[in-house]
Amino acid sequence: MIWRIARSREVTLAAVLIAVAAFASVRAPNFLTADNLVLVTAFAAIIAIAAVGEALVILTKNIDLSVESTIGLVAFVVATVLKQHDMPVPAAWALGIGLGLVLGMANGVIVTIFKVPSIVATLGTLSVYRGLDFYVANGHEVNLVDLPAGYSDPAHQTLLGFQFGGIGFSGIPIFVILAILVVAAVGMALRYTVIGRQFYAVGSNAEAAAVIGVRSRLTVFLAFSLCGMLAGIAGVLWGIYFGTLYASSASGLSLQVIAAVVVGGVSIAGGSGTVIGAAIGALFLGLINNELPLLKVPQEWLTLVYGAVILVAISTDALIQVRSQRAKARSRVR
Amino acid sequence: MTNDQMGVNKPADASAASAAAEAPMPAGGGSRNMANSARAILSGVARWEVLLVIILAVVVWWGTRISPNYIQPDFWNSLNFGASVSGTMEVAIMALAMTPIIIMGDIDLSVESMVGLSGAVLGTLFVAGIPLQLGIPIVLVVGALGGLFNGLLVTRWGLPALVVTLGTLALFRGLCNVVLGTSYVSNFPSNFTAFGFGYVPGTDVPWTLLTFLVLAAVFCAVMHYTWIGRQIFSVGKNKDAARYSGVRVARVRTAMFVVSGMVAAFAGVILALRYNSVRADNGTNLTLVVVTIAVLGGVDINGGKGTIPGVIIAVFTLAALQSALRLAGVSSEYQNVAIGLLLIFSVITPQLARQLRVLVDRIRQSRRRPARDPVPGEVVR
């Protein structure tokens, strides 16, 4: 039992994460300051929410390359309606999340009804959605001063903080609480509901799933829709976090989101992995993102480290699999 | 473009094959030969490549409507079709190398970063005083090594090509950043940059276009007329069957990744010479265009199907569309939208055609339904 827990990706990744954080806090005293921790975890929370959606899609053996454009478009549209139309803030957020859902559903329709392979479909919508973003922006940008006063504050606020005698705890950032809620809700649904199990069934063997009565196309459509909606939430948070938005905001982010999912142990071949893993993967990448500058590693190395992390993560997976298969084969011979 | 020209791909194109099967038999009297040739012609017409040529013709016609300069008088200069073609050559040659990879069911997302890396290495060597005559071969070796790295991870460790090349997409770009930093290299010798944007002496043909055509001929010959091509298609259709019939699957797949890496490095050299500058962000976002060209050219993203002539026509279609849009005053961001829509459309159309055909088949079948009910378990088509 203990061996099984130790072998699970989530636990090993969390252990590596803590080790890296410990190393950073020793080498760079700035790392453990409350401000920095809020900064790191709040951004990681945005990626984590998007990664949960991406994990749903990858579980069904598909992929969504268009999340970065959805995030960018939603962030810009929300900021634009706040700037130009004096819409109440919650309504603008709801609009943004709804827009994300619609974009995700469009992906789902192209993949399930028109039967376009997801990598091609979302490669197409990656540039189509980005084009919409440029259309909405029309060469302009939105600055923090254009938005309601204190719009960016939630990104830095924390909850559950306390001060007790000499011990202080600055609390958990709001974004992180939100991410935890999302991960918990989606994770529970995947584990304990029929629809949740169907995601795994479709991903591991679509034909077998169809035989036992799983409506696989509906499941895939649901995955893309949820992915779009979660990307919409991530887009809203992105707008709050940065305050200043361009038509090209969040470009290149899909790589980071998919990397988080893969590093978190979700198999790209579908059918295995958890959303908790994906979220921990996002936190891990966010930590690296923040630590390298603190450790005085030049910014140029960041992409290199990202690539190395992805390759190391998938390679260890492969090695473990080969090992366990060999062990099984050996025990069978006996 | 008849099936015979496609060589090994003959059975690969299921839509053409089923179209041939549907071709109405000549009503009595027609000899068997005539029926066969009618089928061949019909299946030729039903090919995706033919549809693509029609799209190309429509786009060119539209281009000439927007501006009379579109193809005349100054064909290879200014903002016209010709300039667009010569500006697309880097992605065009990468699409050639991507084709066998996708046909085998793999994908190489890292090509755009290899373009950046090869430019960075070339520029750094040039600054260090190494002449381009020596620098270019070194860069090609770098590309081959990068491709070998991809190929070995995919075949030796059995990792999915999508994730491996996603990783090396970041890894190669990272190496490129590390090598070059924020600096840039410029002022390559003019006899080399002439290769980037000059013309073959005495003609109006850009060097880059000539390079593409030569490479295209080589790829076409190898893919459709040699045992290497046959092995590639057999791997794409069924890896196990290919292995049992003696194809060294891992070796073929690795070799194609090496080719892709080398070609991407070469594309990086062309890009560096054409811009006469090397920066760390050279080539970003090119993978989208490369994959678009391949898929638009009729290469099945799931593997097993595709032709080099299709990819060649797709190159020209895309270039024609880009320059027509540019003449119509559409900015580059919206051009990307057009490319994205074209990509989705190019997959949806054959899909819809196939579904329509199934529907027609079903209606036809229901008309000549057998008198008796089907026996349980009997397959009614």
Image: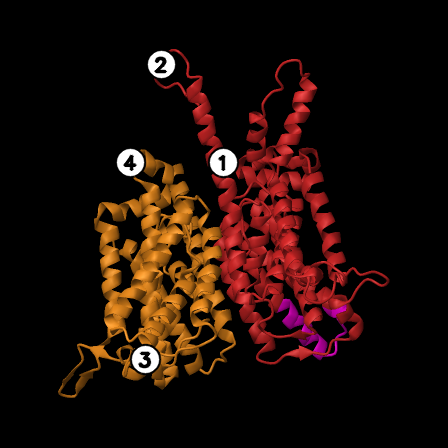
Chain colours: A orange, B red
Amino acid on which disc 4 is placed: Gly
Residue stretch in magenta: B117-135
Q: Quadrant of the N terminus of chain B?
A: top right
Chain to which the residue tagged by mark 3 belongs: A
Identified at 78% across, 59% down, the residue is: B205
Chain letter of mark 4 equals A
Q: CA distance from mark 2 to mark 4?
A: 27 Å
Question: Residue beneath label 2, please?
Answer: B373
- The reply to whether label 3 and label 1 mark residues of one chain is no
* Earlier sequence position, callout 2 versus callout 1: 1
* Marks 4 and 1 close (CB-CB < 8 Å): no
Tell whether A66 sits left or right of A200: right
Q: Residue at x 30, y 80 (%)?
A: A152
Which residue is the site of mark 4?
Answer: A213
- 3D distance between C-alphas at marks 4 and 1: 26 Å
Asked if residue B285 is among those painted magenta in the image, a careful observer would answer no
Q: Is residue A25 left or right of residue B176?
A: left
Q: Nearer the viewer, residue B312 or B272?
A: B312
